[in-house]
């Protein structure tokens, strides 16, 4: 998959900071990929570089909210 895309949104009424962490080999360690802030009513869109590799990706938020992280690999 050389086209890896991400979209993050949430339902909070305040900005939410997300940590995007990747685990490239399947059994640790987790590495910080990026921290981003998503404002209310907006979405964050990102295309990963072609060289990005991860077995697992996790997302954490600094506020309680319902959030969606949508990954599309083509």
Image: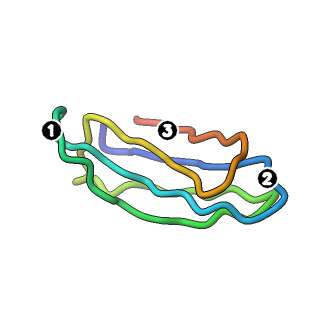
Q: Nearer the viewer, residue 34 or 65?
A: 65
Instruction: Determine whether 55 is above or below 30 in the image.
Output: above
Q: Secondary structure at mark 2?
A: loop
Label 2 CA crowd tier, 10 Å (few <14, some 14–19, many 20+) = some
N-terminal-most mark, 3 or 2:
2
Spot occupied by residue 61 in the image (x, y as percentages of width and height): 58, 52
For residue 5, side relative to residue 10 (left or right): left
Q: What separation in Å lies between label 1 and label 2 (alpha carbons)?
A: 33 Å
Q: Please name the residue that numbered disc 2 is placed on.
A: 12
Spot occupied by residue 11 in the image (x, y as percentages of width and height): 79, 47
Q: Please name the residue that numbered disc 1 is placed on.
A: 25
Number of marks present in the image shown: 3
Q: What separation in Å lies between label 3 and label 2 (alpha carbons)?
A: 21 Å
Q: Which mark is nearer the camera, 3 or 1?
A: 1
Whether pointer 3 and pointer 1 mark residues with C-beta atoms closer than 8 Å, the reply is: no
Spot occupied by residue 17 in the image (x, y as percentages of width and height): 59, 63
Q: Secondary structure at mark 1?
A: loop
Instruction: Determine whether 32 is above or below 68 in the image.
Output: below
For residue 24, side relative to residue 68 (left or right): left
Q: What separation in Å lies between label 3 and label 1 (alpha carbons)?
A: 19 Å
Query: At 42% from the left edge and 42% from the top edge, which residue is drawn?
Result: 58
Q: Secondary structure at mark 3?
A: strand
Spot occupied by residue 49 in the image (x, y as percentages of width and height): 32, 58
Q: Quadrant of residue 3?
A: top left
N-terminal-most mark, 1 or 2:
2
Q: Please name the residue that numbered disc 3 is placed on.
A: 71
């Amino acid at each position: 998959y050389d086209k890896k895309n991400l979209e993050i949104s949430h339902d909070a009424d305040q900005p939410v900071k997300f940590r995007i962490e990747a685990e490239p080999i399947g059994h640790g360690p987790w590495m910080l990929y990026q921290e981003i802030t998503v404002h209310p009513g907006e979405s964050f869109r990102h295309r990963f570089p072609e060289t990005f590799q991860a077995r697992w990706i996790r997302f954490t938020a600094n506020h309680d909210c319902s959030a969606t992280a949508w990954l599309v690999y083509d």
